[in-house]
Amino acid sequence: MIYILKSIVKTIVRETSAHYPLETGGMLLGYIKEKNYYVLDLVEAGPNAVRKVNYFLPDGKYQQPILERKFNKSNGLITFLGDWHSHPNADSYLSKLDMETLKNISEDDGAQITCPIFIIIGTSPLNVRGFNYDNGIYKELNLEII
């Protein structure tokens, strides 16, 4: 299960709308407890993010120091959980590139998470879905807005 703050969902919808018809996204921050993900914050894409109709690449040099600052400020409670991104004019499905990215995140020692999540917002129809990758298995997770 993914529990996500209503304010984070509003930000995701606002960012998706602001960059439409291009993909956009960002980092999801929070914590994991008893196999549940709690999304409490995010880091925006950054000024040098690459946004295309069906491709998005965040500005990692912009995001990393913000992630570290939030991690330190929370005494390690708030950490990287994964990413969110939009699928303009498409459903919120997990594409082959999304699967590859989730797998790469799980294998990246720097990410420090072996079972990352993706939240994908589709605009046709408008919906939001969550996914994770854990030990070679991709799984859709229920989302609950809190």
Image: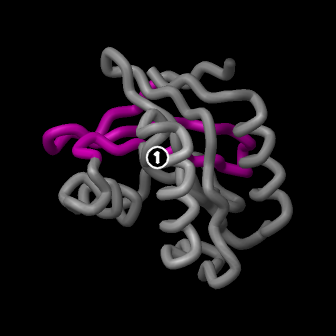
Look at the magenta stretch and give its main secondary structure: strand
Number of residues whose C-alpha sits closer than 10 Å to that of mark 1, classed few (under 14), some (14–19) or many (20 or more) = many
Picture residue at 44% right of the left edge, 20% below the top: 1
- The image shows residue 120, relative to residue 25, as above or below, that is above
The three-letter amino acid code for the residue at tag 1 is: Phe
Percent coordinates x, y for residue 87 in the rendering: 62, 58
Drawn side of residue 133 relative to residue 37, left or right: left
Q: Which residue is mark 1?
A: 118
Residue 56 showing in the rendered view = no
Q: Residue at x 18, y 58 (%)?
A: 107
Estimate the x, y position of residue 16 in percent, counting from the top left: 75, 57
Q: Is residue 117 magenta?
A: yes
Q: Residue furthest left?
A: 135
Along the line of sight, which residue is nearer the eye, 126 or 114? 114
Q: Residue at x 40, y 32 (%)?
A: 140
Magenta stretch bounds: 113-141
Q: Element under label 1? A: strand
Q: Position of residue 73 (x, y in %)?
A: 55, 44
